Amino acid sequence: MKKNFHAACILLLFVLTGCSIDDADKKPSVYSNNLVLGASARDFLSDETFTRIELDVVYVMGHKPEDQVLQSLTNFLERYTHKPGGISLKTRAIVSPQMGSYSIKEIKTVEKQHRSVFSEDDKLGVFIFFADNKSEDSKANFRILGKAYLNTSLVIFDNQELSDMAGSASQSEIQTVTLHHEFGHLFGLVNNGSPAQSEHEDPDKGSRAHCSVEGCLMAAAIEFSSSPLSFLENDQNILDFDEQCKLDLKANGGK
């Protein structure tokens, strides 16, 4: 049995009006971590300003991502970004904020309290929070798996319930695909920081900043079926960008 889950609803309209971005910095600065989603797209992709990336991975106790999830993310970033200084990460656990289902405002509060890696010199800092509950925007038949909500910030919501429902797709596999999708938004896809080189943005008003190509990592909905998303050493079975999204990334400084 197939289940459809939305990996993200990070829409251009949503970012500007419905995702608590109204307090984002208006003054442009490559070192700011409080800019609108997509503002740091070229900083992620090129080595013009930042030559390395450091991931600040914060998780609620009992929700630590598996090593293979973070290794796959590192491989993914090395594949698409020009960062000769490499990709590094630091991980640490925090006690549950006891917030129940999370709003973006609450996620931002967690970030303000616990973020310890920021962009400086030649380092681009990224905050990743593995939450212990779902998004408040999730519905019975519409689950938000993750959200990139600022230029260098994203959250992965708890998805154990979904892995129990989604055939043979494990929690780690769902987290991996969701992480890659959310980084696609940080990279400015689709047409939200990395200009589209061809017409492939989803025309559905509710799916803006997503790709219209079926099977692309940046599709608005990701389908987890009975076929496993196998973890291979080179991640070749993990869902990936389609050719049009890849062209957008290259045109904006990526590999």
Image (spheres, rainbow, N blue to C red):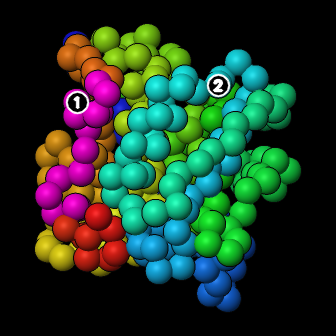
Query: What residue is drawn where x is 73% and y is 56%?
Result: 117
From the viewer's perspective, is 189 left or right of 98?
A: left
**Residue 240 forms part of the magenta stretch:** yes
Query: What residue is drawn where x is 45% and y is 73%?
Result: 47
Helix, strand or loop at mark 2: loop
Label 2 crowd bin: few (<14), some (14–19), many (20+), radius 10 Å: some
Residue named by callout 2: 64
Looking at the picture, how far across and down is residue 138, in whole percent? 52, 36
Question: Which residue is more in the foreground, 111 or 235?
Answer: 235
Residue named by callout 1: 237
Q: Is residue 68 in sight in this rendering?
A: yes
Q: Mark 1 or mark 2, which is nearer the start of the sequence?
A: 2
Range of magenta residues: 232-246
**Which amino acid, mark 1?**
Asn
Looking at the picture, how far across and down is residue 53, in whole percent? 56, 58
Question: Which residue is more in the foreground, 86 or 192?
Answer: 86
Quarter of the image with the N terminus in it: top left
CA separation, marks 2 and 1? 23 Å
Looking at the picture, how far across and down is residue 15, in whole percent? 52, 66
Q: Say if mark 2 contacts mark 1, CB within 8 Å.
A: no
Query: What residue is drawn where x is 22% and y is 30%?
Result: 237
Helix, strand or loop at mark 1: loop
Tell me: residue 115, above or below residue 151: above
> Main structural element of the magenta stretch: helix, strand or loop?
loop
Label 1 crowd bin: few (<14), some (14–19), many (20+), radius 10 Å: few
Residue at the bottom extreme?
27
Which disc is residue 18 wearing? none
From the viewer's perspective, is 37 left or right of 219?
A: right
**Which amino acid, mark 2?**
Lys
